[in-house]
């Protein structure tokens, strides 16, 4: 088995547990809409300390094939979107040791 980059949703769960978390899952709705289009290249640039890491953790938890995050998003805005459970990203990985490339499930 290969090594997944950003394998889990734990970092986003920590953010959800925080008293100051602000739901920004509308970004996921937009990302789903522009995926596989010319507008699909999204830059998440913000000043220091304005939530870039939390946004990256949210994207990882939502699109990761390595974990089931459905329950984490159930009470958030994205759960009302018709594409909520449809989108997963598939990516190529690299097996360490035997130097093979594989497609994630």
Image (tube, rainbow, N blue to C red):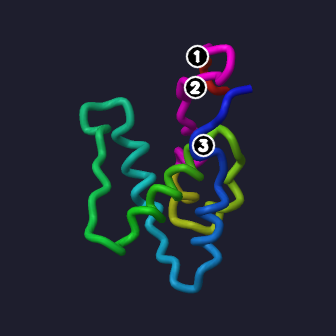
Q: Earlier in the sequence, mark 3 or mark 1?
A: 3
Residue at figure coordinates x 70%, y 46% from the top left: 67
Element type at mark 2: strand
Q: Position of residue 2 (x, y in %)?
A: 68, 28
* Mark carried by residue 64: 3
Image quadrant containing the C terminus:
top right
Give the CA separation, mark 2 to mark 3: 13 Å
For residue 12, above or below residue 19: above
As drawn, the label of residue 101 is 1
Residue 98 x, y percent position in the rendering: 68, 14
| Mark 3 Cα-neighbour bin, 10 Å: few <14, some 14–19, many ≥20 | many
Which residue corresponds to the image point at 63% horizontal and 37% vertical from the top-left? 4
Q: Nearer the viewer, mark 3 or mark 1?
A: 1
* 87 is within the stretch colored magenta: yes
Q: Where are the magenta residues, as a range? A: 82-100
| Residue most extreme to the front | 97
- Label 2 vs label 3, nearer the camera: 2
Q: Are marks 2 and 1 in contact (CB under 8 Å)?
A: yes
Report the residue marked by disc 2: 93
Q: Earlier in the sequence, mark 2 or mark 3?
A: 3
Q: Is residue 19 above or below residue 16?
A: below
The relative height of residue 76 versus residue 83 in the rendered view (above or below) is below
């Amino acid at each position: 088995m290969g090594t997944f980059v950003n394998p889990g949703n734990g970092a986003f769960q920590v953010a959800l547990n925080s008293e100051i978390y602000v739901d920004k899952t509308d970004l996921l709705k937009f990302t789903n809409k522009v995926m596989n289009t010319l507008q699909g290249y999204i830059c998440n640039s913000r000043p220091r300390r304005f939530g870039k890491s939390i946004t990256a953790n949210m994207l990882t938890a939502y699109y990761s094939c390595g974990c089931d995050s459905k329950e984490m998003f159930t009470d958030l805005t994205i759960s009302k979107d018709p594409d909520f459970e449809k989108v997963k990203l598939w990516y190529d990985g690299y097996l360490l040791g035997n130097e093979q490339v594989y497609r994630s499930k």
